[in-house]
Amino acid sequence: MPSNITAFDKPYDHGNTIVLNWNGAPAASGYYIARKRAGEASFNPLTIAANSTFYDNTAQNGISYIYAIAAYSDNPLCASKYDTSVAVAASDNLAPVKMFAP
């Protein structure tokens, strides 16, 4: 099962990208990633990732998300469930633009 999942809003992107990282599961062929908005009851499938880093470029500025990751494998005994999740908020974290008077 994936472990030590971390998520953060990618800096300087107007709150449009969340970066997920995790420790891979032994014998995993890939990972299912699901997402829900904070307050929603169930996760929605988002994508399949081949490695232990994923960039969610569909995040919307100002929305809080919860992600869940499950490993899959060609060996059914090595698969995991969506039982590990992490929460993160997308935010417009650009540095303030300096304005100069004419």
Image (cartoon, grey):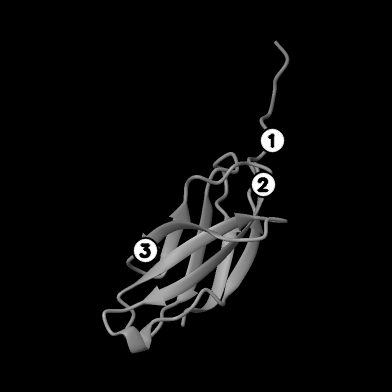
Image quadrant occupied by the C terminus: top right
Q: Earlier in the sequence, mark 3 or mark 2?
A: 3
Question: Dot 2 lies on which element?
Answer: loop
Q: Residues within 10 Å of mark 3 (few under 14, many from 20)?
A: some
Closest to the camera, between mark 1 and mark 2, is: 2
Mark 3 and mark 2: span between their CA atoms? 22 Å
Closest to the camera, between mark 3 and mark 1, is: 3
Residue at (42, 66) in percent of width and height: 32
Please provide percent x and percent y for residue 48: 37, 62
Mark 1 and mark 2: span between their CA atoms? 21 Å
Please provide percent x and percent y for residue 77: 35, 89
Task: Please name the residue that numbered disc 1 is placed on.
Answer: 96
Q: Is residue 66 above or below residue 63?
A: below
4 and 44: which one is in front? 44
Please provide percent x and percent y for residue 12: 56, 43
Q: Residues within 10 Å of mark 1 (few under 14, many from 20)?
A: few
Q: Residues within 10 Å of mark 2 (few under 14, many from 20)?
A: some
Q: Which mark is residue 6?
A: none
Q: Which mark is residue 49?
A: 3
Q: Earlier in the sequence, mark 1 or mark 2?
A: 2
Mark 3 and mark 1: span between their CA atoms? 34 Å
Examine the image and state in which quarter residue 53 appears.
bottom left
Question: What type is the residue that disc 3 sits on?
Answer: Ala
Residue at (43, 60) in percent of width and height: 54
9 and 77: which one is in front? 77
Question: Dot 1 lies on which element?
Answer: loop
Q: Which mark is residue 63?
A: 2
